[in-house]
Amino acid sequence: MIDDFIINALLAGIAVALVAGPLGCVVVWRRMAYFGDTLAHSALLGVALAVSFELAPIIGVVFIGILLAALLFWLEQRRELSSDTLLGILSHSALALGLIVFSYIQLRVPGIDLMAYLFGDILAVSTDEIVWMFAGTVFILALYAGLWRPLLTISVNEDMARTDGVRVALVRFLFMLQLAMVIAAAIKVVGILLITALLIIPAASARGFSSTPVQMALLSAGLAVTAVVVGLGASLYQDIPAGPAIVVAAALGFFLTRLPRLRY
Amino acid sequence: MNTVDSEVLLSATGLGYAVRGVEILHAVDIELRRGEILTLIGPNGAGKTSLVRILLGLKEASCGSVHIRPGVQIGYVPQKLHIDPVLPLRVRDFLVTAGRFKQERLLQVLQEVHSAHLLSASVHTLSGGEFQRVLLARALLHQPDVLVLDEPAQGVDIIGQQALYRTIKHIRDRHACGVLMVSHDLHLVMASTDQVVCLNKHICCTGHPDDVSGHPEYLKIFGQAMEGLAPYSHHHDHSHDAHGNVVPLERDNQAVADDR
């Protein structure tokens, strides 16, 4: 018999994988991997603030995400430093600040576990949370589908999109919101430090087998779900931590796709 | 084509643009009429791309104003469009980033640039010339009144460039749109342009290509570069199509007639 907590873990993982795959494609197309990583690192600060104000973590994560994007936008106005340098500064200072705020929370809320946030705690997902995760998945996927054409157009060329009448800044902002929401949901599954892997590895694996953007997004979702199932399975049988096992499963899949015989 | 009396689609007066105190454009006036091909030439760093971006509303001028006739649709082919190979994209997928269009419409615009066979090809396997034609086709989807082409012939060999400029001219003839083109080589665009604006931060000279190529301001900028590069002016008894096949001259005209 399979225990409830395993079913819950599987459902939570699948809910997150279904959005992480397609969103990850846009992250890869727009070279936003480092931005995603920065957003993920800042999520700890968001969680810590949400807990201290007794709000849902997702509110804190999205709020900090918006703040971070605004800060990045402002810093990029003076073109002395490239955006990867700026992201490196923001990413690590946000994580450090998050760790400090979290240390205060730990004094007030006994039993709150830093490791669960950093590396995920998928086996502790409650049924309530799963309902929320699937509702979130449906919402984000609907938004993603609605934004599909403008997202693709700005991935090809932002100037061309602008002259087509696409409101580029709005589309970018909405995509950033979706990313922040996925990150908030994925904290439980793989943890803050490993979320980017779930976004970019399935997308990168899917590239070699796709000739259209739609194919790549669908295949990426499928590969992300597979990584969750395989990683969770390995974690149960070998008693290894679930979050890292999922990421390693995704990475193994990626290296398999690099084998020359499998590619066409 | 007589363009003097036709409507002004796009105009700018007194445009100035400066970045951190460095002047890029100074007192630029420009006017594009329906049915006219206007070529903007100038050396690197002359502010050609800045001017185009200001006209398109992608950049804000420091002073001056741009006026676009109400209801005018603009089709744009940007300079150096590089599609990252990580994005799997067929020509068909690329075209529909411009909007929801039926397959017949996609084929129609591809036919106008003699590239219907490319519909299902990956954009990553196209040659420079093929890619520029696909960009042109995408710009045609919304039936533009104004086509803005920033260096449309880059990455295209000389024969291909001549064919491409011919295609652009035919598009102008068929759709009676205005074409604003950026180029750095006057000799190649000469045959297919009505008006040349020579830009070097300010407008040095403007007029018919034959007049401009003899203008002292033009020679001051381009004269030295032209020494030892005397243009070899001659006629061909045949031409080449987009695939490099030998075709009789005026084949493009014939093809346009056939399309109808």
Image (cartoon, rainbow, N blue to C red):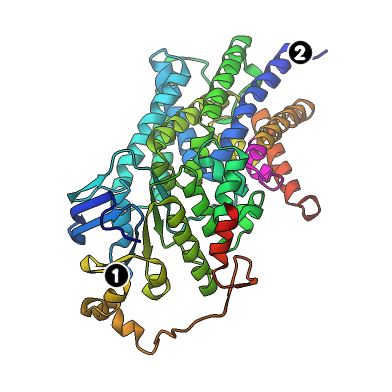
Residue at label 1? B208
Q: Which residues are magenta?
A: A203-217
Disc 1 residue type (three-letter): His
Whether labels 2 and 1 share one chain:
no
Q: Is residue B33 at all visible to an observer of this figure? A: yes
Residue type, numbered disc 2: Asp
Q: Which mark is residue A36?
A: none
Q: Residue at x 73, y 32 (%)?
A: A226
Q: Is residue A11 left or right of residue A104?
A: right
Image coordinates for residue B219, horizontal then vertical, percent: 26, 80
Residue A79 drawn in magenta: no
Residue B114, percent across and down?
59, 58
- The answer to whether residue A8 is left or right of residue B80 is right
Q: Which residue bears the numbered disc 2?
A: A3
Q: Nearer the viewer, residue B120 or B256?
A: B256
Structural distance between the alpha carbons of marks 2 and 1: 83 Å
**Which residue is at the front of the view, A61 or B210?**
B210
Which residue is at the front of the view, A12 or B1? Answer: B1
- Point 41% across, 67% down: residue: B192
Magenta-span inclusion, residue A205? yes
Secondary element type, mark 2: loop
Kindly identify which chain the residue marked by label 2 belongs to: A
Is A261 rendered above or below residue A47?
Answer: below
What crowding class fits label 2: few (fewer than 14 Cα within 10 Å), some (14-19), or many (20 or more)?
A: few
